Image (cartoon, coloured by chain):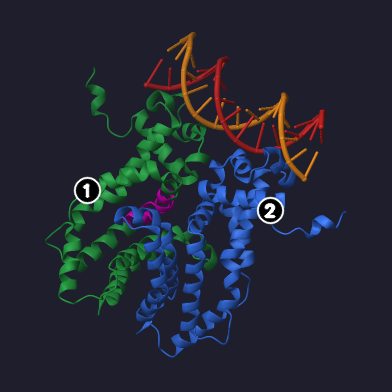
Chain colours: A blue, B green, C red, D orange
DNA sequence: GTCTATATACGGATAGAC
DNA sequence: GTCTATCCGTATATAGAC
């Protein structure tokens, strides 16, 4: 009787509420979300949110932590893989992020916005999850730099460009689609194209 | 007596409340902002907000409209100037935006986030302000394309890249600075560098 | 125009029945 | 575990004095 409920997978009430909360928080942000919205979205009663999660804030914390992990830690293995070249890493990074962003287009603006509103509480966790120690990707860059195979400008520019070109189209997506009259399917196809284009452009920038 | 107050410039109570509201809304977003915060920030009494603006929402609308205009309409003349080349337009655009973003680093995430939460209400206005009719910048691009001087991929990619590389560093700025331990002055200096780098990179991408 | 005091509504959280 | 009913703090908005 007691261990029966431990076996349950993703259809438990608790999990359903979390799923609903994820959707509502993502759409409206923390402050604009009412626990009543989450209850309605989940199909369960308002009081169950407090029964399972104590408070709106605790529920939000759990979900936010999951998102931050999704953003950061999933790429840890990738950038530390000694068997792939720097260029291959760039290709894999871009491809990985674009896949994730097509699935969750609202994720970046949600995370970045909540971090902006509450930096102390959230950036600390993000750092925790970034793991310490040297990243293999950085080593590879430094080797290229010493060999004079890479421009002398601050390498952070390239990292910024990589993230910019990958992530920003999703953040500006709603406006962009509105201004160009582009539908979602065409937009996503364009993002798929960018999996190959972005590494190519970055490569071009990095050529001395 | 009646026309005296028309001459007042930016030090009226109304304007001070608007300034305060701009700051608080920008920092916390619409939902998380309390009219009390605005009152406190302005140095005036809570009730004056309703006296001058009827409601929190109306005050927000006014400010948001100003921001959207700032974003969109200030570049109208620039992209329609027949006397500058396409490349010069890119340089001017990047330079213009980076200046604005150094002044108002929180502006993009604020505007993009509020638009995401309330697209119907806000995107319509943005379109209004975008003015109709052909943009000279687009004509110049098409001429280059017909002359085969530009790659065959969707030109929207370049527009996206331009905006991405210009705007995104400010959106991701807090995280970026935290991860790299970079201070604000160094960050801004890096953004200044990008005024020259971004047009150069875009030019490289556009070469066939 | 600007303030104090207050009406009114809303949202998070809990008590308690089932 | 899940529901109904309700409490209570907080936030917007307004009435009315000065």
Task: Give the x, y percent position of residue B68.
Answer: 33, 46
Task: Give the x, y percent position of residue B15.
Answer: 35, 33
| Camera-nearest residue between C3 and A51 | A51
- Is disc 1 placed on a helix, strand or loop? loop
Q: Nearer the viewer, mark 2 or mark 1?
A: 2
Viewer can see residue B188: no
| Residue on which the image places disc 2 | A15
Is B102 a magenta residue?
yes
Q: Is residue A33 above or below residue A188?
A: above
How many residues crowd mark 1 within 10 Å: few (<14), some (14–19), many (20+)?
Answer: few
In the image, which disc is placed on residue A201? none
Residue beneath the point at 18% across and 77% down: B148
Residue range highlighted in magenta:
B99-112
Question: Which quadrant would the C terminus of chain A be assigned to in this image?
Answer: bottom left
Kindly indicate the quadrant of the structure image that contains residue A76.
bottom right
| Camera-nearest residue between B92 and A166 | A166
| Residue on which the image places disc 1 | B131
- In the drawing, does residue B20 fall left or right of residue A19? left
How many residues crowd mark 2 within 10 Å: few (<14), some (14–19), many (20+)?
Answer: some
Residue beneath the point at 43% across and 71% down: A162
Task: Give the x, y percent position of residue A171.
Answer: 43, 57
Question: Which quadrant would the N terminus of chain A be assigned to in this image?
Answer: bottom right
- In the drawing, does residue C9 fall left or right of residue B115? right
Task: Give the x, y percent position of residue B111.
Answer: 40, 48
- Is disc 2 placed on a helix, strand or loop? helix
Is A46 a magenta residue?
no
> Could you give the CA–CA distance between mark 2 and mark 1, rounded to whole angstroms?
47 Å
Residue beneath the point at 20% across and 56% down: B78
The kind of secondary structure the magenta stretch mainly shows is: helix
Q: Tell me the chain of label 2.
A: A
Q: Tell me the chain of label 1.
A: B
Q: Do labels 2 and 1 share a chain?
A: no
């Amino acid at each position: 009787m007691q261990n029966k409920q431990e076996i349950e997978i993703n259809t438990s009430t608790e999990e359903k509420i979390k799923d609903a909360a994820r959707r509502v928080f993502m759409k409206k942000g923390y402050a604009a979300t009412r626990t009543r919205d989450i209850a309605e979205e989940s199909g369960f009663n308002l009081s169950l949110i407090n029964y399972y999660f104590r408070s709106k804030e605790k529920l939000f914390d759990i979900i936010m932590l999951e998102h931050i992990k999704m953003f950061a830690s999933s790429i840890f293995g990738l950038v530390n893989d000694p068997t792939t070249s720097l260029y291959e890493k760039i290709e894999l990074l871009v491809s990985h992020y674009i896949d994730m962003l097509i699935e969750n287009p609202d994720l970046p603006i949600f995370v970045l916005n909540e971090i902006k509103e509450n930096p102390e509480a959230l950036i600390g966790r993000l750092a925790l999850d970034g793991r310490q120690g040297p990243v293999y990707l950085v080593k590879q860059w430094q080797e290229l730099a010493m060999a004079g195979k890479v421009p002398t400008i601050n390498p952070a520019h390239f990292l910024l460009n990589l993230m910019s070109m990958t992530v920003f189209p999703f953040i500006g997506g709603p406006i962009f689609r509105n201004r160009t009259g582009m539908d979602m399917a065409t937009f996503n196809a364009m993002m798929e194209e960018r999996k190959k284009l972005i590494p190519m452009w970055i490569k071009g920038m990095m050529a001395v």
